[in-house]
Amino acid sequence: MMPFARKPRVAFFDFACCEGCQLSILELDEKLFDLLAHVEVVAWREVMSEISEEYDIAFCEGSITRQQDIERIKTIRDKAEIVVSLGTCASISCHNALKNKWAMNELLALVYSEYGEHIDTIPARPIADVVNVDYQILGCPVSLPEFETVFKRILTRQAYTPSNQPVCVECKRNDILCVHEKGMVCLGPVTRCGCNAICTAFGDACRGCRGLIDDANLEAPVRALFGEKLHPIMAEVARNNRLTGKEIIARFSLYNNTGRVGKGEESSDGTA
Amino acid sequence: MAAPDRQQAADISIISYMPERAKVISTHRESSATTIELVLEDGRPLHHSPGQFVQVSVFGYGEAPLSLCSSPTRSESFSICVQPKGNVSRAITALSSGDWVGIRGPYGQGFFPIDQMRRKNVLLVAGGIGIAPLRSLIHFICDKQKDYGRLQVVYGAKTPSTLLFQKETAQWVENPHLDFYLTVDQPDKTWQGRTGVVTEPLREMDLAPDNTIAAICGPPVMFRFVAMELLQKGLSGENIYFSLERRFKCGIGKCGHCQLNDLYVCRDGPVFRYSDLQTRKEAGEAWVPEKAQDAAKEEKR
Amino acid sequence: MTPRGIQIISGPDFNMFLEAIMAVQTVIGPRERGDQPGYYLFSRLQRAEDFAPGYKTTTLPPKKILASPKEKLFSFTFDKPPRLRLHVDASPFVLLGVHPCDLAGIDALDHAYAHPPAEMRWSANRKRATIIGLDCQPDAYCFCSSVGTDAARIPCDLFLTPIDHGYLAEIHSDRGRQLLQKANTSNAGEEELAAAKRWRQQKVERIRAKFDAPLERIADILETGGLTPTWKETAKRCYSCGSCNTACPTCFCFDMIDELDPDLRGGTRYRTWDSCQLLDFAMVAGGHNFRGERWQRVRHRWQRKFLYLFRQFGRPYCTGCGRCSRACTVDINIVDVTNQLIAAAKMEG
């Protein structure tokens, strides 16, 4: 049941991101040791200082935001047998793509004034937009049970497709009270699950970090009740009692800036 | 109100979804699909009928429904023919002899007209991988030749290289008891046979419409055209059978995935009479000719 | 269904009764959610006080106890031959406080799972459960009187109706009779029987939501068709999130998945709840989706509940609990849409 001829060598790489996904994997605790027993870790900046240039499986975190990133990810692709885009930054660009609303030269002038010309920046792209990616793991940060599942799938050479079901499915399976009942607005009905509804389980709403499902109905109006426990950020949203999914995504445009999962579209209107 | 059969619920033979073990005894790879020959752990025959399917588990990968392509008349073993389309089917095609799988079944109704087919002419039309379940029926009828009338088989594939059971089909051409029409959509340079879709040989064929039963298996798009052709030739809807494909998990009409109006493809099929499907809206929307038009009309309104 | 006996339990005696059961068996019943007062869920009760007899509804029906959202089927190893072990849990428990609609839901699933070919998973869990029903008062979403479940008693062992200072307890099985022996009870008098009757009358009078046609007529309407505009209008609002299915006491569609052990030497097969409203539900291996349009999936939900399963089992696969309407974040209300369908059919003549 071990289709790899030898223990595969695993490396973690980061592009534009907070490295939170790499860090959160450490929270697997003892399970991490079980998983790592099947592989040899050769590069993992959050954990070790040694770096090897030889690896079979590359977990790549972060978005492509600089010209030099393109060269780097191509090199990784050439060396690794399996490339995994780890987390939402790597898979759908996440917050990094907020900058795509501006022209890059305007943006550089705005942020760095006259020093801007020395800075290498390009519109943020998911890794799959630049090289072929074998596995995608969504989430900001990645969900540990899902990371574990994908890790085992990789080792047994099974495909893995991020779930195309909305977060509502996992909320219900876990018998979590719908946050709409608490007067909050939630992106769960249009957002891919796989997170085991962790945000709603802890009383927050879904902010859409895993990207939209394939048939997200952005014209459907979300029920936004005006509850006492309303989060201040959502007050404005809730005052308008019938916002459509599209409008709510515009208000939560942190994550869904570069199109749908797996498509890697570069363009964006900042909404979906 | 129908009471649930409590007696049955007490029976240990009720389904737990845990399969029994079966061993791979041979594999045969062709360019578009792999045929896997299996035997149950205790060696007992599967006792299936042509057109039935089994739920095949590759542990750790999952379970998938697969048509049986062998005839119960031939051996203790049974065979499935698999195209690597998904996670499970890829794992199945990667199996080699000595490997173990899990088997549930046989399930489904199979070609239930097998008794009605007696003494009648039988026409089988296969497209692509659709030859697999029909192969079971071909073997079955060939082995019980005196019970049946003329056997005619039309088999179409996209290209010559995707033709399945090539050794066998070469023999079928020679078989005097079988009229075999082989055709490909896209011939290559070496191809000397017929070209075109399966309806073309059908058009030329001389059928006795009142004494012929037809069974069809292939991609949904093929059904519509083959059905139209056969109806035009005077076959009645009751004498045309389809083997349908759906995705399902249980195989016994519980999981809901394969529901087609009030029918479950796994439990009530996978072989259905054309005349039974005609009255089903959801079958119509997919491919029954006149129903497809009705559905389109209704959609426009 | 006529009870085999009727007894009275006072409030304090009832709490002692629960404590006595809890001493020997797990008791699962409605309790208030810790995170949001006024909302309830079925969960294990630790003490008699955890039981919330006045609950209106729960997000999920007690189905979740008998067919877990993620149910372990069997485990396997990668040995040659693989070793397989069936997962069976035989520990008994008491399922307390089940409203008539949810009893009807359990009964509906009894029929569905036992219909040949029968499966053992559901029936094995059903054998573990002693069910204590509880009468209720409706909320704005309830419409049990339209589907004939307002007085359902099958398949409970005991059934409680709140009366002043306690409960009227109907005995519906030997198991129920045995269980009730743990309680201090007295015989029911005319007064208590009248109180329970008043409770039931009040309940039915308070139900606001109603279907505008009998069930047989609704089935005919769905069969006749010509309702595409209504389906499409409803689908415009629908997220296809599946909450109507996952919150439904009679929905039982499922998926199966294999999970590997961390040591990669074996794993477990589970079945998980699935939903016909989700995009990929009717997708086949080649990529063709037999219900790819949202409106087709919306239609399927109504047809399955009020036509196919209704005709097959002679009962709607809807219990009038209103959970789907409550769970819907876009307010697709099952009663409203059904009445729209009835109205649309009238227009057609």
Image (tube, rainbow, N blue to C red):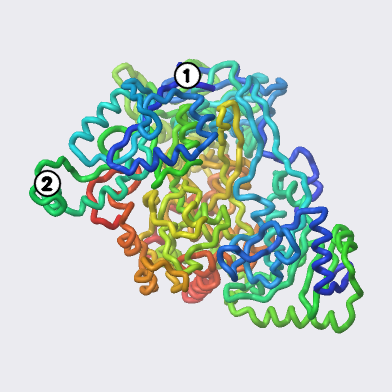
Q: What is the number of the mark on residue B29?
A: 1
Nearer to me, A160 or A219: A160
Residue C22 relative to residue C259: left or right: right
Q: Quadrant of residue A226?
A: bottom left
Q: Where is A228 relative to B287, above or below? A: below
Q: Where is C56 relative to B4, above or below? A: below
Residue at far front of view: A49
Percent position of residue B282, x then y: 49, 53
Nearer to me, A33 or C27: A33
Q: Are marks 1 and 2 on the same chain?
A: no
Please tell me whether mark 1 sits on a helix, a strand or a loop: strand
Q: Amino acid at mark 2?
A: Gly
Give the residue pinned by disc 2.
Answer: A116
How many numbered circles are shown? 2
Please tell me whether mark 2 sits on a helix, a strand or a loop: helix
Percent position of residue C178, x then y: 89, 59
Q: Where is B249 relative to C107, above or below? A: above
Q: Chain of mark 2?
A: A
Q: Amino acid at mark 1?
A: Arg
Q: Chain of mark 1?
A: B
- For label 1, the crowd category at 10 Å Cα-Cα, with few meaning under 14, some 14 to 19 and many 20 or more, is some
Q: Image point 61% across, 73% down: which residue?
A: C142
Q: Image point 75% across, 52% down: which residue?
A: C126
- For label 2, the crowd category at 10 Å Cα-Cα, with few meaning under 14, some 14 to 19 and many 20 or more, is some
Q: CA distance from mark 1 to mark 2?
A: 60 Å
Residue B122 relative to residue A262: left or right: right
Q: Quadrant of residue A59?
A: top left
Residue B170 visible in rendering: yes
Q: What is the number of the mark on residue C249?
A: none
Residue C285 visible in rendering: no
Percent position of residue C32, x then y: 63, 66
Residue C95 relative to residue A20: left or right: right
